[in-house]
Image (cartoon, coloured by chain):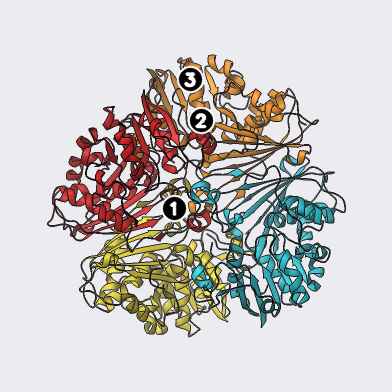
Chain colours: A orange, B cyan, C yellow, D red
Amino acid sequence: MVRVGIVGGTGYTGVELLRLLASHPQIEVAVITSRGERGQRVADLFPNLRGHYDLAFSDPDTAVLAACDIVFFATPHNVAMQMVPELLAAGARVVDLSADYRIRDAALWAAWYGEEHRSPQLLAEAVYGLPEVNRAAIATARLVACPGCYPTSVQLGFLPLLANNLVDLDTLVASSASGVSGAGRQAKLDNLLSETSGSFKAYGVGGHRHLPEIEQGLSVVAGSEVRLTFVPHLAPMVRGIHSTLFARLRSAIGDLQGIFEEYYRDEPFVDVLPAGMWPQTRSVKGANQCQIAVAVPQQRDTVVVMAAIDNLVKGASGQAVQNMNIMLGLPEDAGLRQVGLLP
Amino acid sequence: MVRVGIVGGTGYTGVELLRLLASHPQIEVAVITSRGERGQRVADLFPNLRGHYDLAFSDPDTAVLAACDIVFFATPHNVAMQMVPELLAAGARVVDLSADYRIRDAALWAAWYGEEHRSPQLLAEAVYGLPEVNRAAIATARLVACPGCYPTSVQLGFLPLLANNLVDLDTLVASSASGVSGAGRQAKLDNLLSETSGSFKAYGVGGHRHLPEIEQGLSVVAGSEVRLTFVPHLAPMVRGIHSTLFARLRSAIGDLQGIFEEYYRDEPFVDVLPAGMWPQTRSVKGANQCQIAVAVPQQRDTVVVMAAIDNLVKGASGQAVQNMNIMLGLPEDAGLRQVGLLP
Amino acid sequence: MVRVGIVGGTGYTGVELLRLLASHPQIEVAVITSRGERGQRVADLFPNLRGHYDLAFSDPDTAVLAACDIVFFATPHNVAMQMVPELLAAGARVVDLSADYRIRDAALWAAWYGEEHRSPQLLAEAVYGLPEVNRAAIATARLVACPGCYPTSVQLGFLPLLANNLVDLDTLVASSASGVSGAGRQAKLDNLLSETSGSFKAYGVGGHRHLPEIEQGLSVVAGSEVRLTFVPHLAPMVRGIHSTLFARLRSAIGDLQGIFEEYYRDEPFVDVLPAGMWPQTRSVKGANQCQIAVAVPQQRDTVVVMAAIDNLVKGASGQAVQNMNIMLGLPEDAGLRQVGLLP
Amino acid sequence: MVRVGIVGGTGYTGVELLRLLASHPQIEVAVITSRGERGQRVADLFPNLRGHYDLAFSDPDTAVLAACDIVFFATPHNVAMQMVPELLAAGARVVDLSADYRIRDAALWAAWYGEEHRSPQLLAEAVYGLPEVNRAAIATARLVACPGCYPTSVQLGFLPLLANNLVDLDTLVASSASGVSGAGRQAKLDNLLSETSGSFKAYGVGGHRHLPEIEQGLSVVAGSEVRLTFVPHLAPMVRGIHSTLFARLRSAIGDLQGIFEEYYRDEPFVDVLPAGMWPQTRSVKGANQCQIAVAVPQQRDTVVVMAAIDNLVKGASGQAVQNMNIMLGLPEDAGLRQVGLLP
């Protein structure tokens, strides 16, 4: 059995990791840390886990974590970058679900996160954990930076267009909608049911922290600098991200549907829908799937791509398990065969 | 008292008209028609109206309707265009909430609605009932075509940019999200709570019937042909439309905020929010308001406008009452001073 | 114009008071206090109020409040009982929406609220503000204690049975469901959309603070001690309380429907539905109404009563305005004619 | 591999069966029937199944179905009772999720379902598929009648009280709340999101079809006739049933918590929560679990039991798979180890 450690398991990505790993045939969760909940059983905090885990939260202990085969960080940003150097030095391999190692440029990171990076020496080594782009590098990585939820959906939607050089790179638009769980399990007024239910709004219009991560990833694939206008929205639901992407075609394309299907032909977790069928977040609820569709409305020169994921699964914990499987040479879908919960 | 008739009052725009008119000091609803519900009291069908109306549904009767000062059509498309000619001939004035008279080109209407128009001779006379554009014409109109819900939010958002010639006209993008009430009070599988709750999706990507209406309205204001990529989405809520609009600025603009505030300075029902504050649909729930914000993310060359309305109020029945007030010379906000229901 | 002061207007009952009073023809809100939001305009905190109020929050000042004709307390418990004595001494009349003066027995209050009462000398004078029971006393009161949301629905449902001596007094059961706004506008983890949406639960089963208030009110009407088993539940919605009440009939009753209709015949804000029609919270959303139905399933000996209100209107701020109207000799429905927002 | 047939797989219990069976290691779904959707792939109708099933709907064919080891009926009532006799004769074993064989008295069935039973000769043989009561009989049954969703939660909650003779049998009360998926995947106005979202209501107060089934089951365990007042409610959510049960204790009981824990000690799918912790439907979303709690508020003589299930899993398809496992001698939890989806 592979021994897994989880740092910071009291948030939604933490409980989701535990849910997914409970059905993983080769995994044992050896340790889960939380300073605030030390001593409490995970199943008392998250009653859906009753009968599946006897594990209790413990204080983080580098030696204990380093003895694990894989350590997940399911923490807010700013935690992993302080602990990871020591863990790597002790021989651990790390999958970081937070933002700490996603951006390769330490100055850019500091500009968006408002503080200096604490282990910039690892930024060059960290592998951006989007398997559809970096599978080979992930397999041998010591440190994988799991993409954010918006970035996963936006990049997977744009990739076939950029890799095939089909669109203008400076007019990209992403209009994304997320469920409220993306804001985390924190006591904030803005995320009360009474503040969000029955309402829809944009936020972070002036600049969302996922923007530089997306532009970085898209630019790598495009081989040139990409400029994106990105507007995230909050939708009155718990889970799910739906990104609607707009780009100007460089020329008329005969078979965009075929290009998308070909691009993702061998990907287990990206599903190009049949022509004329649009993704819904409910179809991937609880599943490590990205469902994608492409269209050119009115046969004009703007292409529209829609991509739907569960922000907590393919947008976070599921993708983290996928990365782990690749790193450990396990079947990539081990523990990730859940069918979406519909209705 | 002004005597009002309502044709087809069993849908959501019908009950919303009744709700608004109940607080209108100069109005009496004299007749409301429905073939299917003939004889039933409106308050039995819609229990929120108990204590406010004794009225019952009746079969449509041209003479009775023509005796009203104003007749609202709260019907699906295809009804008004058959009844309106006779009503106008009998001296009535009409506010049509349906799509029948919104598009001036009968061939275009037929192409999008899949049937021939039945009274094309009235298309030139019908006034498009967006008061912020056509107030003077509305005042003297016999026939007002109330804008659709999406078109209201999209046009109000784009107008200041187009009227001031600030953006490219062929790269406009509108990404809109609507509550499910926009689909009407009809027994359709797709609109069940179990099919829509907790989910987000795009629909009508290939072409939504509101597109030609929007392009027509924007082109008039721009003085030139406008091309829009319009993607509507369904959000898991009852009421509200939020449109996020993208356009390429022709040149750097110093004070977009000021331009928007100036443009809508005298409008009672368009509210340009202070800089940095974004609209939420919940702030206008039940109110005849459009809240708007504008931003230029990263100070690049794409401007983003957000506009939020209640699809059943400023997007339908409230705007219809606003048109009626203008037509009758009443205070434009009579019956329309409701505060949004928050939370 | 009547001058109104509001203490503690940053919660949901505060914004709801402002919404209702905005349409009250004889009222001017002269002052609204909040230490935390001092200086902020109410319309900045609650954007639904834009265009309706220029008022800003200010620090509480007894002299300023005492100069008002009526002072509302829209505060958590423990605030009014400290400020009210001085206000009454200064000549003000008070409507307290909090729990401070609802229970006449200071020891009982202390047992449930975990602290000593700070102005027990006023408990005998305070009038319990359920107009359907205490209208005459309210009219002349200096201090009215507005009932809680659950107590309003439970008492209105049971009253006709108890006043007519129809049921056993020691086997009453109330199973109530509330929207999340009942928990207030506070940053608590338990009330996040992600924690409450799509879920239903009981809470406070061991003892909810509204229990002694309900038993006190029912006992007064019954003329004998009443014992109630009360289980509140949290439903995944913003507004609304639905109480389902069970009692054992002392003997077979011929016409319970008629008894209920007779009991509430002259009440403007209690609506006994026709036989066979059950209340829904959505029918009273935003309205100062209680809709009630009664049934005897299987013609056995258990009577079931259902009562639905909007917890923020008839369960709080609407009832407060109703009390104010009675105290001031205004029409009881002034500012309270809003039609429920359906859908 | 066990070959499974499903009759009528286009509803929510159908897609849920497919979801659960996709993770069952010993099962192959050989056939799924639907007259209306014949030829369509199940994954086209239910996109969450994409990548898990190639199966298409086919017309029902007795020979094909009889060749299966187990046939599930996921149909409305009135279908199974016509097809089951022939299937049994052909050697099949049947798990019926519909109501057709739940009530042993054909006259009672006819009274509640408004038509004659078509195969009353099987009523005596059919085993009521509540494993916690009838495990041994299920193991050898040819025909298992899966309990309804409400009956599962209500019976599991009352059983320890009745089996231990602790409460009055003629004063039982059940106040249950269900998500809208319980109403099935049918195009009905009442179940639109716009009709149900943000609202709570009772329904079927005069008599719900699950009442006789519950009373029958409880009476068997109590050994005497039980009379229940049962009020179901509709809560604005997709999945979940929460039943709050009330009963009069015959005498003071020392350790109800211990009695409940003992009663369900060996049950894999009934989870008695620790004292003071109340069930939430979200904790069992997607899981074949019933979470139960018991309390005696104010230490009086009324006991309150709360029981939460996912109506589509332990209340329908999960329980059906559990029955199948028992019938086939498979591990009872095969295919049923899913962790609830939280948040």
Q: Position of residue C246 (x, y in %)?
A: 28, 65
Q: Position of residue B279 (x, y in %)?
A: 64, 54
Q: Is residue A201 above or below residue A59?
A: below
Residue type, mark 3 in image:
Asn
Q: Which residue is mark 1?
A: C236
Please tell me which residue is depicted at 48% across the width and 14% down the height of the picture: A329
Disc 3: host chain? A
Q: Quadrant of residue A160?
A: top right
Q: CA distance from mark 1 to mark 2?
A: 27 Å
Q: Which residue is mark 3?
A: A325
Residue type, mark 1 in image:
Pro
Disc 2: host chain? A
Q: Nearer the viewer, residue C180 or C246?
A: C246
Q: Indicate which disc residue A288 carries.
A: 2
Q: Nearer the viewer, residue A264 or D89?
A: D89
Q: Is residue A31 left or right of residue B77?
A: left
Residue type, mark 2 in image:
Asn
Q: CA distance from mark 2 to mark 3?
A: 13 Å
Disc nearest the viewer among 2 and 3: 2
Residue A50 appears anywhere in the view:
no
Q: Are marks 3 and 1 on the same chain?
A: no
Q: Residues within 10 Å of mark 1 (few under 14, many from 20)?
A: many
Q: Secondary structure at mark 2?
A: loop
Q: Quadrant of residue B93?
A: bottom right
Q: Position of residue A17 (x, y in %)?
A: 44, 30
